[in-house]
Image: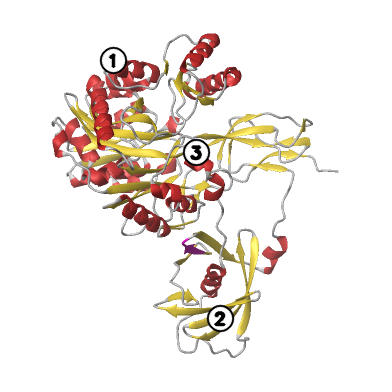
Amino acid sequence: MFDKILIANRGEIACRIMETARKLGVATVAVYSDADARAKHVAMADEAVHIGGSAPKDSYLRGDVIIAAAKASGAQAIHPGYGFLSENPDFVDAVAAAGLVFIGPSAAAIRAMGLKDAAKKQMQAAGVPVVPGYLGENQDPAVLAAEAEKVTYPVLIKAVAGGGGKGMRKVARPADFADALASAKGEAATAFGNDAVLIEKYVDKPRHIEVQVFGDGHDAVHLFERDCSLQRRHQKVIEEAPAPDMPPEMRAAMGDAAVKAARAIGYKGAGTIEFIVDASEGLRADRFWFMEMNTRLQVEHPVTEAITGVDLVEWQLRVASGESLPLRQEDLSINGHAFEARLYAEDVPAGFLPATGRLDHLQFPADARADSGVRPGDSISPWYDPMIAKIIVHGHTRAIALSKLSRALEGTQVAGSVTNLAFLGALARHEGFGRGDVDTGLIERDLAALTVQPQASDAVRALAVLAAANLPEGPNIGFSLWSPLRRNMSLLHQGAAVEAQLAVLAADHALVRLGETELCGRRVAGQWRIDGAPMIPVQKAAGAIHVFAREGAFSFTLLDALARDVMGAGPTNATLSPMPGLVKAVFVVPGQAVVAGDRLAVLEAMKMEHTLTAARDGIVGQVLAEAGQQVEAGAALILLEEEA
């Protein structure tokens, strides 16, 4: 076993690796950018090395600097985590050339699986079923259109070097093929520097089921499947293991195919074989096909750990240090069911825009596993993925595990940044998902219902009023000499005033009037309860009151008279940056006429590009930003002339 390893990553995965390394007695070295100088993973490590600026290209993608840090610190091996350099074969070669061990597969294995078309050809040769389609090198649009006709519509155009849904287009009829092809190729060229595509048969009711494999370079085993069908825009939201309603014969067939794939490339370490499954007639052993292999540890690996009892990071360290596979296939079995929900700083009503903010309060339930790279007081950086945590639960049955997930999400408290927590809770309570009737289109079909913004109930608003009043406990709490027994209070919530009247009757008894409604508050063990209902958690942080109800989290602040007078004021002619980010392009100049919906600029933030459009017809008055400029949230980028 190694004495010391360097972790070439950040956030929750860096912290996750450190936990296992500590368990094995292995010292850890963290690397960090300017933005991460006070990050949780830096504090957890035995030592830390600064590697550059906040942008990934200036730090976490600098393989030479990371290797130099490993050698200078005396680390014997580098664990890449996932993302950044984890699937970069040139980095793997450089690690080996420096006399260090890469905790992961060989460069040859990564290269073999790096391009989707080449990988599928290799899998076909190994006897692994692949989706019907065209994997040829001829990229002539006429040839691709003819091949699409052979596959039969609907078809899927996919970038051969793709990932994350980029360079992917569904085409329902031949007349739409040319435009979809041009769009996919353009996006692929921008994202990957390679505009080559392949054509696949589009599956009508697709499920995304992947198999966890592990190899030691000589042999391989599988650790069963995960269902990752609950996706939005090809991004996973909630994962589970095992897949619901999986027939034993199909599980065996998928596991066998995954092991064949790993053995075909002499795979070493943790990897995932991703399959697309046609669930239109239920799960059948002849209806799954290879999509791609992820040659690294996956974000959703904890659900596999929960059902198998295996620490996959421990296996990675043991195999990389020269051990054989810790267990044989017959030694592995499934125990119960597990779910993982990805908690992000996201503005759901704004179209799931990544968000930033200081985490004024952060608390996870004690009966769930929470893998997180942030702590209370930390800030969500605009430079990296806005994940706050992964919430993982395990139960003896799927129904029990899903109930535990719902409760765990209800018990998770985040204040200081908008999140997708209410959205996750709605998914956990979704009737179809509860039955296990899932496919990759579920979220999009029910998006409107799943993203309904929760409204603060009278009970929630009354709790906020009581918390804002900051009433002391004591026998004379209701006594008043100079002030009236009833007092008016104003709070601000979601841009609107909450007007209330508070009457304090005793140390543990108060009345809150909201309009024509009066609610009774009783204080029990230091916590207020409204009208005898169960206690709802309330936290005060950074000058705000946060109420964490089952339906969502609600924030309030005390409102003074001046603030109430100017509420809602602000320019109506400004296009503002919705978050901190980098201006990638500006499409207008002063004096140009625009109509509502016209593209004005593109902002890059949180690994995504966001198109900013005109809110109304008008004439561009000022352009206040230029391509390449870093801007803060709320910064005015483009001003329209005042309307006549």
Residue depicted at 44% across the width and 42% down the height: 35
Q: Secondary structure at mark 2?
A: strand
Residue depicted at 30% across the width and 29% down the height: 68
Q: Could you give the CA–CA distance between mark 3 and mark 1, rounded to whole angstroms?
A: 39 Å
Tell me where residue 333 sits by quadrant: top left
Q: Residues within 10 Å of mark 1 (few under 14, many from 20)?
A: few
Say which quadrant the N terminus sits in.
Answer: top left
Provide the residue designation for mark 3. 606
Eye-nearest disc, 1 or 2 = 1
* x then y, percent, for residue 47: 28, 43
Q: Main secondary structure of the magenta part?
A: strand
Provide the residue designation for mark 1. 125
Q: Residues within 10 Å of mark 2 (few under 14, many from 20)?
A: many
Q: Secondary structure at mark 3?
A: loop
Eye-nearest disc, 3 or 1 = 1
Say what amino acid the circle numbered 1 marks.
Answer: Ala
Q: Which of 498 and 148 lies nearest the eye of the viewer?
A: 148
Provide the residue designation for mark 2. 511
Q: Could you give the CA–CA distance between mark 2 and mark 3, rounded to whole angstroms?
A: 45 Å
Relative to 49, say whether 420 is above or below: below
Tell me where residue 119 sits by quadrant: top left
Residue depicted at 17% across the width and 38% down the height: 3
Q: Mark 2 or mark 3: name the one nearer the start of the chain.
A: 2
